[in-house]
Image (cartoon, rainbow, N blue to C red):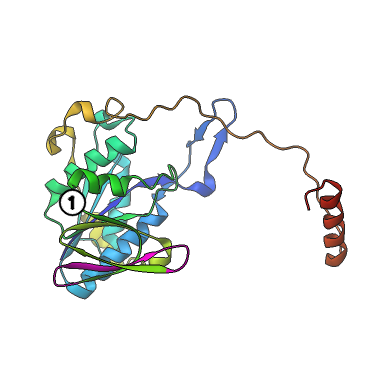
Amino acid sequence: MNIAVCIKQVPDSDKVTIDRETNRLNRTGVPSVINPFDENAIELGLQLKDKYGGKVTVITMGPPQAEQALRDCIAVGADDAYLITDRKFAGADTWATSYTLSLAVQKAGNFDVVLFGKQAIDGDTAQVGPGVAYFMDIPVITYVKEAEKTDKGFKVKRVTEEGYQVWEVDGQAAFTVVKEANTMRLPSLKGKMRAKSATITTWGADDIGVEEEKIGLKGSPTIVRKVFSPPIKTNRETIQNEDPKQSVKELLGKLKERKLI
C-alpha cells in the first residue's frame, strides 16, 4: 500500500502569546512542533503499513525549518519525506495551500490513500484535507477513527456526535483523522539515527508545476480585514472558602443575585 501523510509544523501552543500592541502571535523563541492532530494521521498511516505492507511518505509545505518535522516522522517509521518550500508560497490561505499540496502529492507518487490530521491547531479551519481532495478529484471522509483496506478500497469508522458511522469508499481516497484514533508511537534509536541521515527531497514552485496566480498571497481569496484579541476582563471574582459546600452556596447566591440562574 502506498500511503501519503500531509503534515504541518506549528508553534507549540502552550508557549504562544499575543502581542497586545500588534494583536499578532508572538513567535519569538517559541519552539515548533508537528501539529498534534497530524500525529494521529502519521500513526494511522504507519498502522496501515504494518498491517498491509507498503510505505509511508510524509509531505509538508512550509519554511525550510519544517524539515525537522519531517525528520521526526522518519524517526517513527515514515519511509520518504518531501518539503515543499518557496518564498512564492508566502501568505497562502487554505485554498492556495490545498492547491499547492495537491500538486506535490500527485508528483510524489500514486498513493492509495492521503491522510491528514482533522485540523491544525494554529488555523483551526479543518479545510486543507478536504481542499487537497477537491483539487485531486478524489473522495474525502472526515473525522476518521479507524480504517482498513478492502478489495476495492477502504472501510472506515467516522466519528459523529452520537457515536460513529461505517463508510466504504472505492479506489483512491483522502481521510482526515481524529485524536481518538490512536497515539503516535515513540521513535526508536534506530529510527532516530535513520532520520538524522535521511535525505529530505525539497521542491519549490517550479518543481511541482504550479500556476503562479493560484499560489501564495496572490492565489488566496481569503482577506483578513482585522485581527484582534478579546479584551482582558478585570471584574473577575474569586470565592475562597475552606469548606467546599460553603463555596458552592456562595457561588449559587451570587449567580442568583445576577439573575444568571
Going 77% across and 43% down the picture, which residue do you hit?
236
Q: Is residue 187 shown left or right of residue 17?
A: left
Q: Which residues are magenta?
A: 150-163
Label 1, secondary structure: give it. Answer: loop
Tally of numbered tags: 1
Say if the magenta span includes residue 158. yes
Q: Indicate whether 99 appears above or below 200.
A: above
Say if 96 sits above or below 183 in the image.
Answer: above
Picture quarter containing residue 242? Answer: bottom right
The residue under the point 18% across, 33% down is 205
At x 21% / y 57%, what residue is drawn? 173
Could you tell me if residue 84 is visible in this image? Answer: no
Taking 56 as reference, is 186 left or right?
Answer: right
Q: Name the residue located 81 percent from the left edge and 46 percent from the top edge.
A: 237
Was residue 50 drawn as part of the magenta stretch in this picture? Answer: no
Q: Could you say which is closer to the camera, residue 257 or residue 27?
A: 257
> What is the three-letter code of the residue carrying label 1?
Thr
Report the residue marked by disc 1: 199
Please give left or right for residue 11 compared with residue 185 in the image: right
Q: Position of residue 9 (x, y in %)?
A: 36, 46
User: Where does the N terminus fall, quadrant-wise?
Assistant: bottom left
